Amino acid sequence: MNVTLRGRTGHFRTVSFDAARNSVQLIEQRLLPHAFKIIGTKNFRETAQAITDMVVRGAGAIGATAAYGLAQGARAFRGSDLKKFSAHTDLVFKMLAEARPTAVDPVNAMNDVRRKMLAGKTVAERQFLALAAAEEFANEDARHCEEIGRHGAKLIRNGMNILTHCNAGWLAFVDTGSATAPMYAAQAQGKKFHVFCDETRPRSQGATLTAWELAQQNISHQIIADNAAGHLMQRGEIDLVIVGSDRVLGRTGEVANKIGTYTKAVLAARHKIPFYVAIPLSTIDWNLKRGFDIPIEEREESEVLGAWGIISNPKSKIHNSKLNQRAYIRVANPTSSARNPGFDVTPAELITGIITPVGIFKPKELWKKLHPRITAGM
Amino acid sequence: MNVTLRGRTGHFRTVSFDAARNSVQLIEQRLLPHAFKIIGTKNFRETAQAITDMVVRGAGAIGATAAYGLAQGARAFRGSDLKKFSAHTDLVFKMLAEARPTAVDPVNAMNDVRRKMLAGKTVAERQFLALAAAEEFANEDARHCEEIGRHGAKLIRNGMNILTHCNAGWLAFVDTGSATAPMYAAQAQGKKFHVFCDETRPRSQGATLTAWELAQQNISHQIIADNAAGHLMQRGEIDLVIVGSDRVLGRTGEVANKIGTYTKAVLAARHKIPFYVAIPLSTIDWNLKRGFDIPIEEREESEVLGAWGIISNPKSKIHNSKLNQRAYIRVANPTSSARNPGFDVTPAELITGIITPVGIFKPKELWKKLHPRITAGM
């Protein structure tokens, strides 16, 4: 998407590749929203480290990063011995897969690259095909998000107030995003609307990443405490909710997403506000039989007990973004501990529709209407 | 309640009076949970300033502070001219009433003190009666909270997990608190239970004040993000919710309280978890006809856009409490703004019961069962 720096606007992808330098180019997301910086990894080991260290996060974005990382590793190989090349690329694959062991997207993306690469008969051909496949993967990811936007934009009417939770924006994908895609498409169609970004404690991705994204695209928005959405719904100030997801169960329509999503779905149902989940098809798990079995990660207590930001003056209107002023503060009572479940599961009955690149489905219709198309290769 | 400092445990009230020094003694709440300090005001002007600056907050606590402040001002008068004394005490009353203009508790408390004081025939008698009345007011506040505890403790069974929101603890009253009172009483009865404290963004009173209080009384507790309660309820990990209130409508049973209370009530109702509101009788508004008319304060954006705490290391288990390390950090995107409603209103249908010093009532029964007793002078 567009990013404006020092008055100039340029188009950036979250993940891209510099073929001349054989380098994966990543937006350093840990510095956002206080600084915008593109970093280039020198080799596949640095790429794996960037995934581990959460320089890049989000299903689509880490999938593309791993795909590029595999091509990067393949292209670094010197020689023409196919057997040695295969051993080398196996090592690259393994290191990138282990960078974030619970994520499925990097492995799926690299399987795709490897399969296409093996059509080559020489090392040089395979190196060429690996990069072509990684580029294709990244382009597909971006295109699928655009399709989500095309379908989802129909839900957005002029003057609407839209609530979103966490960041399912372009920073979580190669471009455009999932939950934000309908907003960007609606904006392109000239529609006017306002977005409330849940802060999304404890990691505050709504206040940092989503708010930054929307500000860059000049979309009217305000940040609210996670506590405030219920009150705004009660007063008729929210018309539509769109969130992303980490895993949608194709068999039941249940949606796993950032902690707090379930709460917003319960509130939306009470107030008869449409609640949509926007996802690429790769987010659908066609195997798992019940949401209760989705493992819920318990994260670091320190996330709940404090916060990260830039040391600042609350009365100031201008916020200095010197990164040497970035600090962690302990907010909570020093002798208290915390529970920190990272995700929750929303039942199908609370979800109005699932926005996918191939259309909008009722959550309980995924298995009947979408699964046959998937198994038939669309 | 008890506070343990450097290994020694002492009993403290949030607000008390040092007659020898003619000084109101206040726990400096802005330093909690990172430091515990009692400050003494030198005169009624300093007492008024302490209310304005939120050294002390909470309905019961500021009521008692104003009552003591009026006595403090009366006792500082030199001379025996009753007319001059009256002019002086009127000035004291006015300054303390204007310290937090929207609050009703200071005015109600001072009216009580003034009425009793006027029974005195000399300046010296009135000075004596003013302090006696202020002491009586503070003792009543503490006793009412104990009664809330006595009634509410019946709801707490061994092994329960209790959720609370914000701080309706002893720091908001003279002692014992409202929402926490049943917990302290149940603990005294030897019951074992666990408390989840909602962080309560944006001001984090749950993570700071409530967690500190519970830690001081050795009550098992954990802080959770405001987003997490829905998930915990879904997994059967919450058995009871108790919160306080800023205003309960006696005619409808609607409850105004810290933003996010309504959300927790909606979630509790969905999961059939009992949801109680604990209040002294002074919190009931017998006049207002509908909750929608309760003014909802829009607070500073900076509260939502950042946080206050002690600069620390997230990996550290020991948190330094040097107050010169207290800082405000900007968490949110620097160019984004916020909405910050401070309160919300929960309808009676979502509330299981109102715990008062004179018993537990269904919210819609307040008018029929409690109001006649109030008007009959109990």
Image: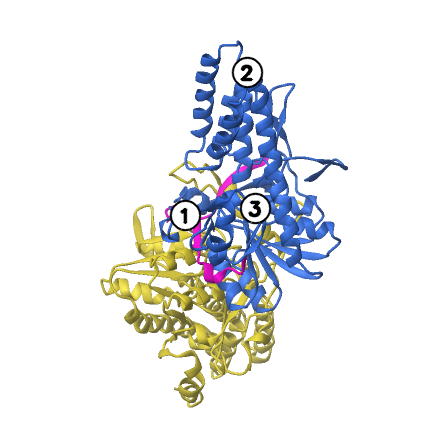
Chain colours: A blue, B yellow
Q: Earlier in the sequence, mark 1 or mark 2?
A: 2
Along the viewing direction, whichever of A150 and B26 lies nearer the viewer: A150
Instruction: Name the residue at 36% across, 49% down.
Output: A293
Task: Indicate which label's residue lies in the foreground, 1 or 2.
Answer: 2
| Residue bearing mark 3 | A168
Task: Indicate which label's residue lies in the foreground, 3 or 2.
Answer: 2
Highlighted range, magenta: A324-353
Q: Residues within 10 Å of mark 1 (few under 14, many from 20)?
A: many
Q: Is residue A29 above or below residue A341?
A: above
Hey, which quadrant is residue A72 in on the image?
top right
Instruction: Name the residue at 50% across, 44% down.
Output: A376
Indicate the position of residue B373 as horizontal and vertical percent values: 40, 87
The answer to whether dots 3 and 2 both sit on one chain is yes
Along the viewing direction, whichever of B97 and A275 lies nearer the viewer: A275
**Which amino acid, by three-letter code, is at mark 2?**
Ala
**Which amino acid, by three-letter code, is at mark 3?**
Ala
Q: Earlier in the sequence, mark 3 or mark 1?
A: 3
